[in-house]
Amino acid sequence: MTFVLWYQGMIALILLIVLWNFAGNLRYFRRLSSYPCAAPERQPFVSILVPARNEERNIARCIESLVAQKYLEFEVIALNDNSSDRTAEILTELQARYHRLRVLPGKPLPAGWVGKNFACHQLYRAARGDFLFFTDADTWHHPQTLAKSIVALNSEGGDLLSAIPQEEVQSLSERMVVPFMHFAVLCFLPLRWIWNHASPLLSFSVGQFMFFRRTAYERIGGHAAIPGELVEDMALGRRIKQTGCKLLLLDGNGMIFCRMYRSTREVWAGFAKSIFAVFHFQLVPLVLLVTVANFLFLVPFLTFLIFCLRGDWAGPAFWLVALQMGAVLLAKLLMSTRFSYPLVDVLLHPFSLLHLDLIIFYSTLQHILGIGVTWKGRRYQTAETPMEDWVELPEQEEALEGPKNGPPAEL
């Protein structure tokens, strides 16, 4: 009994520390919307870059929100990455309507490259801006997103600004899994350290919104430095810090919007693609983190259920478990309130974590069996390959070279 009380007390203490960090992160997590807009006389030229593959559901809303930015000096370049749906047709129609939009046909995917990385690399070669704003085709943006991003980056002395979008969730699977992106970051990462500490381990960046100074992007080698990286946003964020540049992470709520997935199938495919890759396909750190997360965020609910079934309401262990559960639910409530998630979903927390556990198991099994992952009609092997083992592509690189700030390269 003494061990049980000691264990439950330790878990309760850890969860209270996590809750304290969570609340501190919410206070420190500055909103992009809180920055003023750039004045007309201080508007450097920005290239907004959108890779698009099989995005017929999303691309029109994304492009229309980008060309409507209340900012003077910018261009929008979208690259059709060999889509098999109506993406190319829709982009052609949009290009005829909006003079700021330029549409590029994507080249065939070379060996050793992930599709999005190669698409972004081609977009970079065509861009003329002193700032490079990479955003996904499933996002849409407030008209002042660009103007506020410039002010945020310049006023904070940043080299890469990333922001967590306001995620739209509708299906049950989306509602159970997608909010964990916010939850995990706010629980485990001290956001103040992301801004103020140089360690690459203290970094977090979101591929839906990556706003670079061009000089910093070129300094880290851009997407060409990570051709086969499945989780390219995290890799670029780490490289920013490794080269002595400054990474900023902001709350994009109310400014940047995204619906990542629209079905259970898409949720499983999307998270299975990314989760194991975050750990560089190393099983030990993944298992350790999943174990810790389950002991902290799931086991208290299972233990509480056991106490209730036994009718054991009076012991100190019961109240310690109730304290643990309350700390977790309070954190979820604070998160849902801040990031506009349905409040009723707080009660789904145990089922959400079980759902995520199943996706992690599925992602791991794909790797162990050598199946790889399939995304947007392309299959990638989930094995960490040293950079020197990738196929060198001098011909492709030469073809993609172009003047950095002059006329766009011909693609």
Image (tube, rainbow, N blue to C red):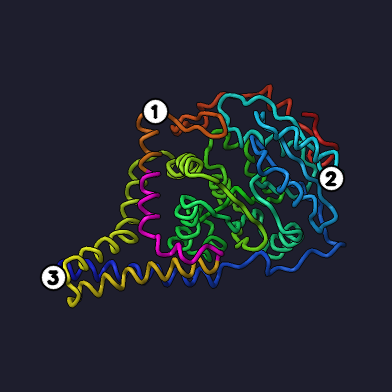
Tell me the distance, in whole angstroms, between the alpha carbons under discs 1 and 2.
44 Å
Q: Position of residue 178 (x, y in %)?
A: 49, 53
**Reading the chain from its start, which is encountered first: label 1 or label 2?**
2
Is tag 3's residue or tag 1's residue first in the polypeptide sequence?
3
The residue at the point 61 percent across, 24 percent down is: 110
The one nearer the camera, 191 or 332, is 332
The structure residue drawn at horizontal position 52% and vertical position 54%, both measured from the top left corner, is: 203
Marker disc for residue 382:
none
Q: Position of residue 205 (x, y in %)?
A: 56, 52
Identify the element where label 3 is drawn.
helix
Q: Residue type at mark 3: give it.
A: Thr
Residue range highlighted in magenta: 339-360
C-beta proximity under 8 Å, tags 3 and 2: no
Q: Of the residues tagged 3 and 2, which is closer to the observer?
A: 2
Label 3 close to label 1 by CB (< 8 Å) = no
Residue 302 vs 363, above or below: the answer is below
Between disc 3 and disc 2, whose residue precedes? Answer: 3
Position of 334 with respect to 148 (left or right) is left
Q: Which residue is mark 3?
A: 2
The CA span between labels 3 and 1 is: 46 Å
Q: Judging from the image, what secondary structure is the residue with disc 1 in?
A: loop
Q: Give the position of the N terminus as an image quadrant.
A: bottom left
| Distance (Cα) linking label 3 and label 2 | 69 Å
Q: Residues within 10 Å of mark 2 (few under 14, many from 20)?
A: some
Q: Amino acid at mark 2?
A: Arg
Is 342 covered by the magenta stretch?
A: yes
Per the image, is 336 magenta?
Answer: no
* Residue 316 picture quarter: bottom left
Coordinates of residue 256 in the picture (x, y in percent): 66, 57
92 left or right, relative to 156 = right
Q: Which residue is mark 2?
A: 100
Residue of label 1: 370
